[in-house]
Image: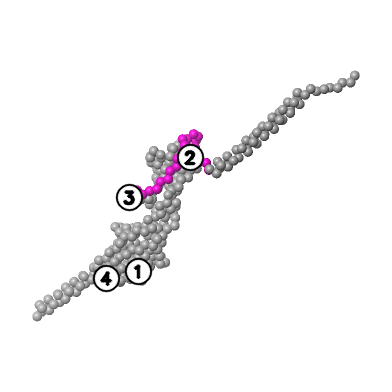
Amino acid sequence: MGSLQKTAVCLLFLSIFSSASDSTFATFVCSDVKTEYYKTAVIKCIGSKNITNVIVKRCENCNKQNSCLETVNTWRGNNSSEKGRIRLVLQHNISELHIQEVKATDQGGYKWHLYSDAGVGDGCATLEITAPEIEPSLTWNGRKLACLSPIGHPQRQVHWFDGHGNNLTGSASLVSEEAEGGLTSLTSTLHEKPTLTASKYCCTVLYDVHTKRNKTKCLSTHKAVTDHPHFTSTPDPEILKTMKKHIPIILVLIVLVLCCFAAVLYYKHCQRAKPKGILQTY
């Protein structure tokens, strides 16, 4: 009898442990998201049954989860952060993290701890933000060339080349200024010694080191005749048209001035050539 009771108790514990094991671990699928700056990003994690509570932490990426910052925690009643810019939406077996007006600091991995009727599980999703890729602009002040990349991802790079493809980036300085939303403005200045003597200079902004996606702006120069080169320029057609209209008037004025000058000279010549009569009385 005692052995039967012990067997029944063991079977009960095994049943409880088995049911607890089945309900402890659950599978969730979290999807990576790619969006543009200032847009709204929606990161989803989907389970097989109704999701009851969620904890989300933002990490550097899904592989580095040592230094993560807690974003939402429904156990503590925190369903949003940053004054509602980041908020959690639970819909049955779907958990969504809505991030409005995404910025550079939002990019990274999002570690999920999910609790559902099926059990507990973890997931991780990556948010990638694409920055605007604006063509750079070049300015020249006589001795220096400056390349401006007005706004973009902080990790982009600026490189310099001459017309022969020689890399001149080592002769340039770079200034980075923070812009709105975690973006940056880059200004690279080329200092070639003693002067800028190449016939062509190009500034290349590299947006992605893996895909080599870039935009390039070039300026052409004449051969240096003086200490400073000058850039090729095209005269304004309106200016040329105006000059052509005034050429006849200018020629007439020059002829009139020459005629007046000739008349004055002729008059003086006549005055000198006229004999002077002297009346003498005896």
- In the rendered structure, which disc, 1 or 4, sits on the residue that comes first in sequence? 4
In the rendered image, which quarter contains the C terminus? top right
Give the extent of the magenta segment.
210-236
- In the rendered structure, which disc, 2 or 3, sits on the residue that comes first in sequence? 3
Q: Residue furthest top?
A: 282
As shown in the figure, which amino acid type bears the numbered disc 3?
A: His
Q: Quadrant of residue 105?
A: bottom left
Q: Which residue is identified by label 4?
A: 49
Circle on res. 78? none
Cα separation, mark 4 vs mark 3, equals 40 Å
Percent of width and height locating residue 228? 49, 37
Secondary structure found at label 1? strand
Residue at x-position 40% and y-position 67%: 84
Secondary structure found at label 3? loop
Cα separation, mark 1 vs mark 4, equals 16 Å
Cα separation, mark 2 vs mark 1, equals 59 Å
Residue at x-position 44% and y-position 46%: 147
Secondary structure found at label 2? loop
Q: Residues within 10 Å of mark 2 (few under 14, many from 20)?
A: few
Q: Nearer the viewer, residue 253 or 200?
A: 253
Q: Which residue is identified by label 3?
A: 210
Cα separation, mark 4 vs mark 2, equals 69 Å
Cα separation, mark 3 vs mark 1, equals 35 Å
Q: Are marks 4 and 2 in contact (CB under 8 Å)?
A: no
